Image (cartoon, grey):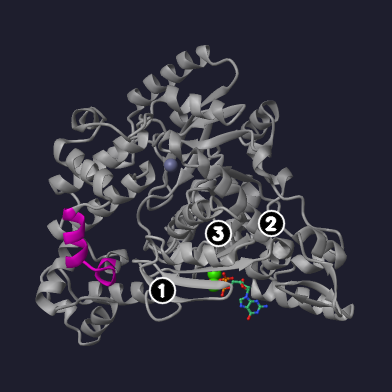
């Protein structure tokens, strides 16, 4: 029986492959699958057991999509999807990640130039054949060539965005954990350190029966191609070409195994050296003095034996964490349970928002928040924004709804769009109406560094801007960040008192951890928020906090870790 997540995945894949097939993201069938995806995502009930009529009663689900869901529920497959997969193998689908290669262009280069994968594309570019095609040209060809290099879509060092790897890792871990004789299963490696891209998925399993675990792993539907299985390690490739390594360990050695397989390599080497300095040996099996086990069951035991504070996984990158832990000076990192409100929050007032104000308020209450700032898009954001009149009506609605929710403070906010020269939505007088504003770029990503930097500086000098949203505008693995003189921008944040946003959307995680750490070295405040467009997006706060930890962000620097009164004073201080 397929779970909701599996149905959603199936619909997403159908939408994606149909888009390629039809050569347009606006094709009727693509929209139908996407609408069904969003409808089911927002549907509260159980899918199992629904008949066709009941399925089509779910918002966005049409008759033909309902048939496919039923087929999927009954057989685990959809004939139409199987057919599409055959015609568009993963190596071809991967080409869609390249900016400038829309479905229409992809169709064209396949038909005209026989391009089937990245390698074929690189050859076509090398032979300067792309530029001959209608709608392309020399500039597009060069842009595409650069994108291939930037995205790392070549050779062995290609990496997968965390947004794709994490759900898969969690789903695998959940199924492995449920096996008899498995005590626990944990995603390790770069995923546990919360790197924004990962080379492969590492899973450590504490079990008394390694044989049955590897047997189970080999039989997983995701295990499209087996790399190897023997002893304590089983490795496979998924259909998308992602490698998964599963290692079994004895429960008594879980701590040392977690430590070893979480890495990073640099962190491990430093730890091992510290053990050697004490005449001991550290391996994935434990911390030893000759044959005597000093510690092995938990990571905490091992750090303690080595006279170190426990170093949280996001810090284990070999960038000063050992020295800090040795001195007992690890920073008091922001924790998820210290977050008191969300500050980048859309309702269906935004064209791309999918839940009502009331639903978003209920969801915020469910997180135990004291406050939430609705930041629907300002007027300049084409189809998603709101005019002044509509914004004021929206404010009145928020105030009316506030009456019914005395336990949470609803702030009337805005996500101001930063124009190409740093101009903001509405005018200064109107912006004053908002309780809180985040300003972000949504276009003109290719400006040269100087213009891009001046653009941000101009926006920062507006007194109504509280935070700068997703600073670089990147999408991990899909769109590189804009070119900024980061020192100049940080300097301006420090001077103006505008906060740096950590955006918890897994495909954004922007600002980057490196930039966050640079901001920590200055006197700059942060906001950590979710950019939620639906009630199901609130989970992103976990991601935002873990990402902030990678930037060594401490609690006292996070504005939305302040209780309501203090937060309001903070938000008002620039005004
Ligand atoms: P990735 O997969 O490239 O995103 O990065 P990691 O850190 O997950 O690296 P991976 O998968 O090669 O190995 C997982 C962990 O196992 C790594 O973080 C540390 C440990 N490890 C792997 N190979 C070595 C090694 O040769 N020496 C040491 N000390 N540790 C290793
Ligand atoms: Ca890995
Ligand atoms: Ca690995
Ligand atoms: Zn937003």
Question: Is the CB–ligand 1 distance for label 3 below 8 Å?
Answer: no
User: Which label lies toward us, 3 or 1?
Assistant: 1
Crowd band around label 2 with a 10 angstrom C-alpha radius: few (<14), some (14–19), many (20+): many
State the mark number for residue 375.
none
For label 1, the residue is: 226
Q: Quadrant of the N terminus?
A: top left
Q: Please tell me in which quarter of the rendered image ligand 1 is found.
A: bottom right
Distance (Cα) linking label 3 and label 1:
35 Å
Residue at 49% across, 58% down? 169
User: Which label lies toward us, 1 or 2?
Assistant: 1
Distance (Cα) linking label 1 and label 2:
38 Å
Residue at 64% across, 29% down? 568
User: Residue 370, image x and y in percent?
Assistant: 62, 26
Q: Tell which of 280 and 317 is nearer to you.
A: 280
For label 2, the residue is: 552
Magenta residues, as a range?
79-93
User: Residue 118, image x and y in percent?
Assistant: 29, 77
Q: Secondary structure at mark 3?
A: loop
Q: Earlier in the sequence, mark 2 or mark 3?
A: 3
Residue 465 versus residue 132 in the image, above or below: above
In the shown orientation, is residue 298 left or right of residue 153? right
For label 3, the residue is: 512
For the view shown, which residue lies furthest in the bottom direction?
A: 127
Q: Earlier in the sequence, mark 3 or mark 1?
A: 1
Residue 522 versus residue 575 in the image, above or below: below
Residue 160 versus residue 555 in the image, above or below: below
Q: Main secondary structure of the magenta part?
A: helix
Is 91 magenta? The answer is yes
User: Residue 93, image x and y in percent?
Assistant: 26, 66
User: Residue 416, image x and y in percent?
Assistant: 43, 40
Q: Is residue 2 visible?
A: yes
Residue at 69% across, 47% down? 334
């Amino acid at each position: 029986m397929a779970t909701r997540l599996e149905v959603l995945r199936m619909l997403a894949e159908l939408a994606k492959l149909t888009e390629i097939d039809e050569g347009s993201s606006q094709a009727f069938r693509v929209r139908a699958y996407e609408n069904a995806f969003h409808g089911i995502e927002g549907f509260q009930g159980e899918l199992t057991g629904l008949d066709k009529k009941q399925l089509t009663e779910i918002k966005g689900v049409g008759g033909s999509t309902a048939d496919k869901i039923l087929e999927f529920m009954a057989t685990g497959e959809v004939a139409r999807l199987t057919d599409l997969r055959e015609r568009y193998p993963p190596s071809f689908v991967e080409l869609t990640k390249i900016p400038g290669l829309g479905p229409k262009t992809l169709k064209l280069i396949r038909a005209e130039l026989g391009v089937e994968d990245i390698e074929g594309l690189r050859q076509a570019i090398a032979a300067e054949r792309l530029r001959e095609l209608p709608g392309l040209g020399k500039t597009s060809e060069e842009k595409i060539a650069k994108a291939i290099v930037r995205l790392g879509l070549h050779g062995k060092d290609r990496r997968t965005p965390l947004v794709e790897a994490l759900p898969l890792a969690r789903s695998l871990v959940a199924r492995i954990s449920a096996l008899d004789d498995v005590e626990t299963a944990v995603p390790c490696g770069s995923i546990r350190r919360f790197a924004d891209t990962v080379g492969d998925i590492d899973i450590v399993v504490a079990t008394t029966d390694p044989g049955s675990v590897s047997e189970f792993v080999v039989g997983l539907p995701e295990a499209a191609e087996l790399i190897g299985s023997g002893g304590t390690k089983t490795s496979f490739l998924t259909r998308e070409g992602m490698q998964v390594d599963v290692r079994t360990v004895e429960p008594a050695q879980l701590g040392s195994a977690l430590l070893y397989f979480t890495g990073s390599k640099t962190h491990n080497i430093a730890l091992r050296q510290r053990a050697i300095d004490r005449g001991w040996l550290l391996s994935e099996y434990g911390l030893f003095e000759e044959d005597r086990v000093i510690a092995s069951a938990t990571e905490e035991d091992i750090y303690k034996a080595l006279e170190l504070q426990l170093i949280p996984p996001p810090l284990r990158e070999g960038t000063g964490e050992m020295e800090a832990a040795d001195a007992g000076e690890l920073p008091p990192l922001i924790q998820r349970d210290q977050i008191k409100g969300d500050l980048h929050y859309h309702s269906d007032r935004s064209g791309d928002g999918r839940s009502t104000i009331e639903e978003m308020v209920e969801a915020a209450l469910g997180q135990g928040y004291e406050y939430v700032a609705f930041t629907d898009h300002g007027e300049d954001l084409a189809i998603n924004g709101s005019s002044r009149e509509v914004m004021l009506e929206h404010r009145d609605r928020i105030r009316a709804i506030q009456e019914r929710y005395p336990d949470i403070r609803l702030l009337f906010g805005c996500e101001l769009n930063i124009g190409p020269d740093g101009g903001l939505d509405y005018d200064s007088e109107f912006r004053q109406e908002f309780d809180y504003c985040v300003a972000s770029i949504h276009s003109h990503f290719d400006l040269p560094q100087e213009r891009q930097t001046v653009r941000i500086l101009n926006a920062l000098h507006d007194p109504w801007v509280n935070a700068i949203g997703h600073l670089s505008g990147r999408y991990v693995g899909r769109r590189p960040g804009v070119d900024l003189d980061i020192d100049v921008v940080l300097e301006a944040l420090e001077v103006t008192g505008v906060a740096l946003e950590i955006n918890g959307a897994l495909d954004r995680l922007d600002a980057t951890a490196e930039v966050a750490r640079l901001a920590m070295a200055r006197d700059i405040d942060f906001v950590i928020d979710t950019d939620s467009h639906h009630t199901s997006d609130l989970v992103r706060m976990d991601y935002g906090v873990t990402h902030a930890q990678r930037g060594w962000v401490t609690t006292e620097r996070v504005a939305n870790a302040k209780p309501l009164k203090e937060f309001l004073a903070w938000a008002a201080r620039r005004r």
